[in-house]
Amino acid sequence: MNNWNKLTPAEERVIVHKGTEMPFTGEYTDNKATGTYVCRRCETPLYRSHDKFDSHCGWPSFDDEIPGAVKKVPDADGHRVEIICNNCGAHLGHVFTGERFTSKNTRHCVNSISLKFIPTKQGEE
């Protein structure tokens, strides 16, 4: 038995059934606050705010993950690489390389609904 968070139907559609939220609608697309993005289902830390960048693609974009937190698997469409939470298998989105948005040349395109943001407390940096 797992202790995962209960998901709303919209969260379940993306996280469990590998859906995608509409572009430019997610709560974290334009978030510029300092903190950590965790998996909405199991709360495993996935991304740090300093790895987030504005790609203008409609979803939060990161050029790096917290080591060991994200697993890359072939997408069912046979063309893309899906990213999932390495702890609970929650669908996060897709990873793309070669776009040259950042020096790391990687873009994790993540559904906001798959994430929860934990802001850094004052003086905690």
Image (cartoon, rainbow, N blue to C red):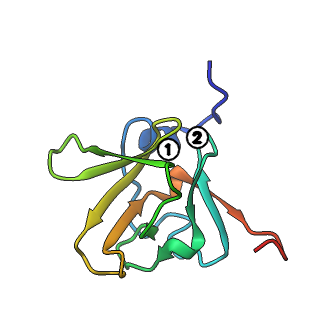
Asked whether, in this view, residue 120 is left or right of residue 105, the answer is right
* Mark 2 and mark 1: Cα distance apart in space: 13 Å
Label 2 residue SS = loop
Q: Is the residue 57 above or below the residue 73 in the image?
A: below
- Residue 3 shown left or right of residue 113 in the figure: right
Q: Residue at x 59, y 47 (%)?
A: 40
Label 1 Cα crowd, 10 Å radius (few <14 / some 14-19 / many 20+): few
**Residue 48 at x, y = what percent?**
58, 66
Q: Name the front one of labels 2 and 1.
A: 2
Using the image, tell me which numbered label, if any, was put on residue 122: none
Label 1's element? helix
The relative height of residue 111 versus residue 85 in the rendered view (above or below) is: below
The image shows residue 43, relative to residue 108, as above or below, that is: above
Q: In this view, does 28 lie to the left or right of 15?
A: right
In the image, what residue occupies the spot 67% across and 28% down? 3
Q: In this view, does 83 lie above or below 112?
A: above
Q: What residue type is labelled 2?
A: Arg
Marker disc for residue 41: 2
Give the x, y percent position of residue 78: 15, 45
Q: Quick one: quadrant of the C terminus?
A: bottom right
What is the quadrant of residue 119 in the picture? bottom right
Would you name the residue on which mark 1 appears? Answer: 10
Q: In this view, does 2 lie to the left or right of 88?
A: right
Question: In x, y percent, where is residue 77?
Answer: 17, 44
Sequence order check, earlier mark of 2 and 1: 1
Q: Which of 82 and 68 is in front in this view?
A: 68
Question: Which corner quadrant holds the N terminus?
Answer: top right
Q: Position of residue 60 (x, y in %)?
A: 46, 68
Q: Which amino acid does label 1 sit on?
A: Ala
Which residue lies most toward the top here? Answer: 1
Q: Residue furthest left?
A: 78
